[in-house]
Amino acid sequence: MVSLQARPKLSIVLLSPELPKLQAGSLMASVAAASGMEVNVFVSMGALGQFRRQVVERREFAAAQDEVSQALLKSGAPLFPELLRQGKELGELHVFACAMAADLMGWSRDEFVDVVEDVIGVAAFFGRSEGATILTL
């Protein structure tokens, strides 16, 4: 009899608005998806504002004054939205905005970059994350 093992799952919670943390979390998510893992990313608190379309288009990221952030912006390397987009193309990667944080700030789904699939609550995210390793950045 063939043993069927569940595909490994990874959930990443992005909380910080700091560009290096957004970049690192998105890179981990993308590589994990490309490696065959099911990946769910939950964007909340300070990180959520960085996923607003106008912030990304203008490259006006909060807390981007540090040396690493400046190097990232100058390098022309793909930034976190593009890394997540690539992960979606290469595997199973889902990105969700936190409903509570969006409501708190008065932001609607259409204000976020297209990589964000939906606005969901914590309970829904935990449901999607059942059996997953959860990383928080």
Image (tube, rainbow, N blue to C red):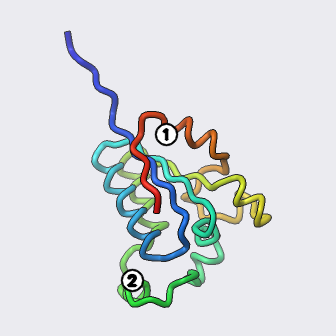
For badge 1, the amino acid type reads Ser
Name the residue located 72 percent from the left edge and 54 percent from the top edge: 100
Q: Position of residue 127 (x, y in %)?
A: 56, 35
SS class, disc 2: helix
Q: Nearer the viewer, residue 133 or 52?
A: 133
Q: Nearer the viewer, residue 136 or 124?
A: 136
Name the mark nearer the viewer: 2 or 1.
Answer: 1
Q: Residue furthest right?
A: 106
Q: Position of residue 65 (x, y in %)?
A: 49, 90
Residue 65: mark in rendering? none
Name the residue located 63 percent from the left edge and 64 percent from the top edge: 45
Q: Which residue is mark 1?
A: 129
- Left or right, 58 with respect to 4, comes to right
Label 1 packing within 10 angstroms: few (<14), some (14-19), many (20+): some
- The quarter of the picture where the N terminus appears is top left
Name the residue located 46 percent from the left edge and 53 percent from the top edge: 12
Q: Which residue is mark 2?
A: 72
Which badge, 2 or 1, comes first in the chain's sequence? 2
Q: Position of residue 55 (x, y in %)?
A: 62, 77
Q: Residue furthest left?
A: 1
Name the residue located 50 percent from the left edge and 53 percent from the top edge: 41
For badge 2, the amino acid type reads Leu
In the image, residue 96 sits, relative to residue 110, either above or below, namely above
Which of the 4 image quarters holds residue 135? bottom left
In the image, residue 80 sits, relative to residue 7, either above or below, namely below
CA–CA distance in space, label 2 to label 1: 30 Å
Label 2 packing within 10 angstroms: few (<14), some (14-19), many (20+): some
Q: Position of residue 80 (x, y in %)?
A: 45, 68
Which of the 4 image quarters holds residue 37? top left
In the image, residue 38 sits, relative to residue 137, either above or below, namely above
